């Protein structure tokens, strides 16, 4: 019986146990906290059926107003670095910022964190413009079902994403993809995902569960079953022992974290950092990691790590650093 048949035959626990054994054998004992940093709330495409930005396109008269202030982005990066969080990637809708601006932002973040960043900014034609400030390119293919992808993301052709990932590798960057579970795929689609990872030399897979945003086609959907999600993750871990796997869940579904970690996740994501920091929800994240028998990189509860109200990078960031820290300190600490 192959791995996918085990999911379909409700033998997910066996997959999870084997994935956990493999992770421990490969010394994958540290779990990272990952934070996607958004550049803008505007997307020129704006037609992905699940996406919050698809509900905003007709509400925003001036896309420039949806851009975040660059100093706010850099201050958030500095706070992530202080707290030991990884920057999952820089993300922005199509035509949110120019390539020149994105490169400058990435370069400044590299200076702050001493780590190159991942990009997740759509189908990018000018990858040659980037250098040591980025580690890799993320292709938002969203689903392993090719026909479903065309329906859900009509303006993001899979072929163009694939071409971008090929060029990325040729330029020496790493490749990542994002996959959303619970949007109509089936276990059989994992075969396509496995082949895609092989064909496009994927180094990192980021899994999310559907977040049913109001105003989208998915607003009445529920998040996928925890054992189904875990079974998919375990299958990828067992098929690709050394791949990096990041798993996202939402603050109303934190009980998923432990089982996803046992299934082979290296990192966890999709948390509102400053709203959850120091709260019972932040503590719950740390407890899920602890009871999965793993070590956590970074903190969700140690307020001493917030540090000074002044930036160590640029005094122009001080107002934003102060705002983020004060927002965190307003939370009810445990």
Image (cartoon, grey):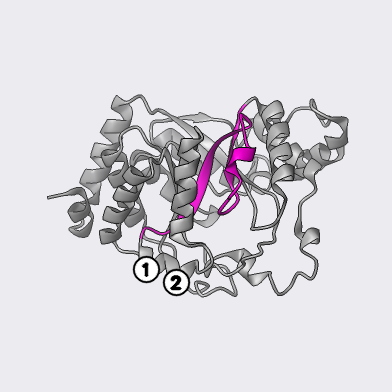
Residue 53: name its quadrant: bottom right
For residue 311, side relative to residue 199 (left or right): right
Q: Which residue is mark 1?
A: 147
Total marks shown come to 2
Viewer can see residue 247:
no
Residue 257 or 194: which is nearer the viewer? 194
- The x and y percentages for residue 178 are 47, 51
Q: Residues within 10 Å of mark 1 (few under 14, many from 20)?
A: few
Check residue 124 for magenta coloring. yes
Residue 133 or 318: which is nearer the viewer? 133
- The x and y percentages for residue 52 are 61, 65
**Between marks 1 and 2, how big is the CA–CA gap?**
7 Å
Considering the image in quadrants, where does the C terminus appear?
Answer: top right
Q: Residue at x 60, y 39 (%)?
A: 128
State yes or no: discs 1 and 2 in contact (Cβ < 8 Å).
yes
Q: Secondary structure at mark 1?
A: helix
Check residue 73 for magenta coloring. no
Furthest toward the left, the residue is: 1
Residue 127: name its quadrant: top right
Q: Which mark is residue 151?
A: 2
Q: Secondary structure at mark 2?
A: helix
Q: Residue at x 34, y 50 (%)?
A: 196
Q: Residue at x 87, y 35 (%)?
A: 316
For residue 84, side relative to residue 23 (left or right): right
Residue 84 or 48: which is nearer the viewer? 48
Residue 301 or 98: which is nearer the viewer? 98
Give the residues in magenta: 115-144
């Amino acid at each position: 019986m192959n791995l996918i048949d085990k999911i379909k035959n409700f033998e997910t626990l066996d997959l999870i146990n084997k994935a956990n054994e493999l992770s421990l054998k490969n010394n994958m004992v540290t779990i990272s906290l990952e934070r996607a940093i958004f550049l803008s709330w505007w997307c020129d495409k704006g037609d992905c059926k699940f996406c919050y930005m698809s509900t905003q396109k007709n509400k925003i008269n001036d896309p420039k107003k949806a851009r975040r202030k660059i100093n706010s982005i850099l201050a958030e990066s500095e706070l992530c670095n202080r707290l030991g969080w990884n920057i999952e990637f820089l993300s922005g809708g199509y035509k949110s910022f120019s390539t020149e601006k994105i490169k400058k932002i990435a370069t400044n973040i590299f200076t702050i964190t001493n780590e190159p960043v991942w990009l997740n900014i759509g189908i990018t034609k000018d990858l040659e413009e980037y250098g040591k400030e980025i580690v890799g390119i993320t292709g938002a293919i969203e689903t392993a079902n090719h026909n479903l992808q065309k329906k859900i993301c009509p303006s993001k052709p899979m072929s163009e994403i694939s071409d971008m990932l090929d060029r990325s590798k040729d330029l020496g960057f790493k490749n990542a993809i994002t996959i959303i579970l619970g949007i109509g795929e089936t276990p059989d689609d994992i075969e396509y995902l496995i082949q895609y990872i092989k064909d496009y030399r994927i180094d990192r897979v980021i899994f999310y569960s559907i977040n049913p945003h109001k105003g989208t086609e998915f607003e009445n959907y529920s998040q996928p079953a925890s054992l189904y999600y875990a079974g998919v993750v375990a299958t990828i871990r067992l098929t690709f022992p050394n791949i990096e796997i990041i798993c996202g869940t939402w603050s109303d579904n934190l009980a998923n974290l432990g089982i996803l970690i046992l299934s082979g996740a290296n990192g966890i994501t999709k948390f509102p950092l400053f709203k959850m920091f120091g709260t019972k929800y932040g503590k719950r994240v740390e407890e899920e990691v602890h009871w999965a028998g793993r070590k956590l990189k970074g903190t969700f509860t140690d307020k001493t790590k917030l540090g000074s109200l002044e930036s160590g990078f640029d005094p122009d960031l001080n107002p934003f650093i102060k705002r983020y820290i004060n927002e965190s300190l307003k939370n009810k600490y445990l």
